[in-house]
């Protein structure tokens, strides 16, 4: 539970309740949101997220580092660094991809994400102040979009969901 103030004082008063099981999450949700549906079915984002993350955030930067290292040391096996880095981090990228989920039901939205700790954002749709649907050229080719939902207290962003779902 958060408020719209972004100063340091409000960060100290941010109300976070850790929950370890889905049952605890459901129980807390019903205590805080009276008419919250029993369950909101969620779906994941596109597999293109994995490709984008591995290529743009892992392989290309590590290849650049390998090229610089090769120019300095002239040892050709430094190029294996790019491949080893990309393959080494692949399980973490897949884990994060699986955690990205979203759904709507009975006037409520739910967004989930995480890597080691998971964040579940549940909000009534009437609290939404602004919605943006954007497509990059790569997303446009695959009919995908990025959805940004602005609430009073924060902004929620989901990448690589179908354009039809984002518009809905």
Image (cartoon, rainbow, N blue to C red):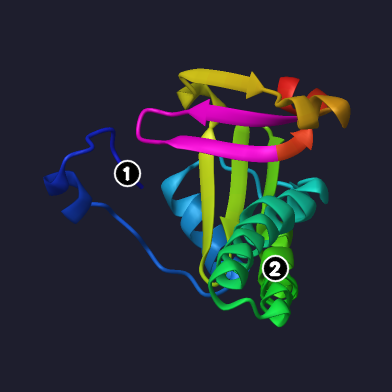
Question: What kind of secondary structure does the magenta stretch mostly adopt?
Answer: strand
Q: Does 81 sit above or below residue 144?
A: below
Of helix, strand and loop, which one carries label 1?
loop
Identify residue for label 1. 2
Identify residue for label 2. 95
Q: Does 129 sit above or below residue 109?
A: above
Left or right: 1 with respect to 58? Answer: left
- Magenta region: 145-159
Q: Where is residue 121 in the image (x, y as percent from the top left)?
A: 52, 47
Does residue 121 appear in this view? yes
C-beta proximity under 8 Å, tags 1 and 2: no
Q: Give whichever of discs 1 and 2 has the lower sequence position.
A: 1
Q: Where is residue 34 in the image (x, y as percent from the top left)?
A: 49, 42
Tell me the residue at 72%/59% (across/down): 54
Tell me the residue at 57%/42% (across/down): 36
Name the foreground residue: 70 vs 2. Answer: 70
């Amino acid at each position: 539970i958060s408020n719209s103030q972004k100063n340091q004082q409000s960060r100290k008063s941010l109300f976070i309740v850790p929950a370890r099981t889905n049952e605890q999450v459901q129980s807390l949700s019903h205590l805080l949101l009276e008419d919250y549906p029993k369950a909101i079915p969620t779906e994941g984002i596109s597999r293109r997220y994995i490709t984008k993350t591995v290529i743009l955030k892992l392989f290309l930067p590590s290849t650049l580092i390998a090229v610089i290292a090769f120019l300095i040391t002239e040892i050709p096996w430094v190029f294996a660094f790019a491949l080893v880095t990309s393959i080494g981090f692949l399980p973490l990228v897949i884990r994060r991809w699986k955690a990205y989920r979203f759904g709507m039901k009975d006037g409520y939205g739910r967004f989930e994400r995480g890597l080691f700790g998971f964040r579940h954002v549940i909000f009534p749709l009437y609290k939404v102040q602004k919605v943006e649907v954007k497509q990059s050229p790569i997303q446009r080719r695959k009919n995908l979009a990025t959805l940004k939902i602005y609430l009073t207290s924060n902004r929620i962003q989901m990448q690589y969901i179908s354009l039809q779902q984002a518009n809905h």
